[in-house]
Amino acid sequence: MRITNQMVTSGSLRNMQKSMQKVSKLNEQSITGKKILTPSEDPVIAIRALKLRTTCDKLTQYKEKNVKDAMNWVDTTQGSIRNIIGHLEDVYEYCTQGSTDTFYTDDRNKIVNELKSLKQAIYDEGGTSYAGRYLFSGYKTETNMIFQNQAAKEGLSYNITQNISPESIKVKNVVLNGVTPENLDGILAGSSTYASPRDKSVYRLQLAYGDLDSTEFSLKYTDAGGTEHSITPTIMSTSQSASYYDVPDNGVHYIPETGELIFGTDVYNSVKSADQITVDYKKSHFNVGDLRPEMYFDCKQTKTMSDGTEKVTDYTVSKEGQPIQYEVNFNQYVTVNTEGKDVITHEMGNCIEDMAQAVQDVLDIENIIKKLNNMLSDPQYKDNQSAVTQINKMLEDADVELALKRENMQKLFGNNMTNFQNFMSDVSAVEAKGGTTYSKLELIQKRVEEQLDDFDELKSSNEDVETEEIAIELYQAELAMDAALATTSSVIQKTLLDYL
């Protein structure tokens, strides 16, 4: 076959262009460090790159955002729980002192205030927040677990349904017919009768709240056979405070002021074996720092708006809880939140209030004794033999009342030693669970970091060129291209005469 100059030239140029394209490609890879710049260059590499990059992006999200956020949430929660345990330990110390009545009279006011401050400190931990979200409020992360200010409780009333175990009915020791110096004049005039103090044990069921409404109240219990029974209690007013605990055997007193139900002996014997007690009551007045009912009970909230209209919202407490979960790795979720009802209970606050009131009762009778002693030297009474005799009688009875109230206080503090040990045990169990969650997150964080390193390496292996290899290939390609240029130039310079 005859080889023409045009054929030689075309073949030489075509091969030279291939060499130049290879040099250009290798030079491009050397500059960018990437095997391809467009998917069309190698679809297999492009598809694999998309998958690996997506995986790396997700792992980066888990590592830098999700896991860290989850760990911070748990860590902040743990700090708050430790504070609660610390406050409970402080209350337990008071229980130890009170069980032996090592309080000094001058310190009783301080103790009352300190106990109430500890109660509020425990409740305040329920308002702990992280990154603008309340930690103990379940799914309602925008709502504080307590009424944090006046505006938060403004215009609110609740119809609360509280399901209670009969085991919550406790024996309470009370003193009836307390000595009242203000009644002296009436006793001397014959318009008032005088009765000596006496102690009594009553069966008390403490509701979650005090200062309740006296309307819209119902009390039911379900017996072991599943039959529901209703009880109509006597609703006591504040003017009947002297009769709060003087309940007949077949009666029940509902005391809205204190949130107590006092059962007569016969009623208690019927109720104590019940499967469940259900109490529906209304509360319209809250204090700043009170726990929100919707965080604990099925209830109906009524909010009175500024224009007088009412907005009604029903709340139901889920038996499954309200877990907030973070995705911390592929298809791996961790629950990070702790619900407030698991670490802060109304029973804690009620026990503290009971102890504070017991100390106040002792303080009050001590002050009454001081007042009666002062009355003996009062010109109004000191020359009146009947008055002196009555005051001395009242002093004797006041000493008896003091002894009874001190005994009741000691028993109450002693019983609460066990209660607060149980509270601390329950909260410590929640803390331990949180610690386990944090340790798990640390392991997940380490695993995610390892996975990210592995996939980064795979991504680099798929997309990136080896600098040393590409440099050698580029050098060889440039040599080949230079040789091609030299050969082509020498071939193209020759004519047909050169071959004759």
Image (cartoon, rainbow, N blue to C red):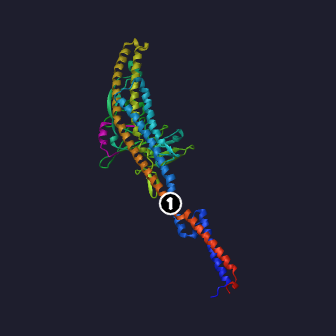
Instruction: Give coordinates of residue 134: x percent, y percent.
Output: 49, 45
Name the amino acid type tagged 1: Glu
Instruction: Give coordinates of residue 199: x percent, y percent.
Output: 32, 28
Check the image and report above or below for 194 versus 443. above
Which residues fall within the magenta stretch? 259-276
How many numbered marks are there? 1
Q: Which residue is mark 1?
A: 457
Residue 464 visible? The answer is: no
Q: Residue at x 31, y 42 (%)?
A: 271
Viewer-closest of 493 and 203: 493
Viewer-closest of 93 and 212: 93
Check the image and report above or below for 197 versus 446. above
In the image, is residue 419 part of the stretch drawn in magenta?
no
Q: Residue at x 51, y 44 (%)?
A: 303
Is residue 131 found left or right of 403 in the rendered image? right
Check the image and report above or below for 246 versus 381. below
Instruction: Give coordinates of residue 260: x percent, y percent.
Output: 39, 37
Viewer-closest of 478 and 396: 478
Is residue 468 found left or right of 251 in the rendered image? right
In the image, is residue 269 part of the stretch drawn in magenta?
yes
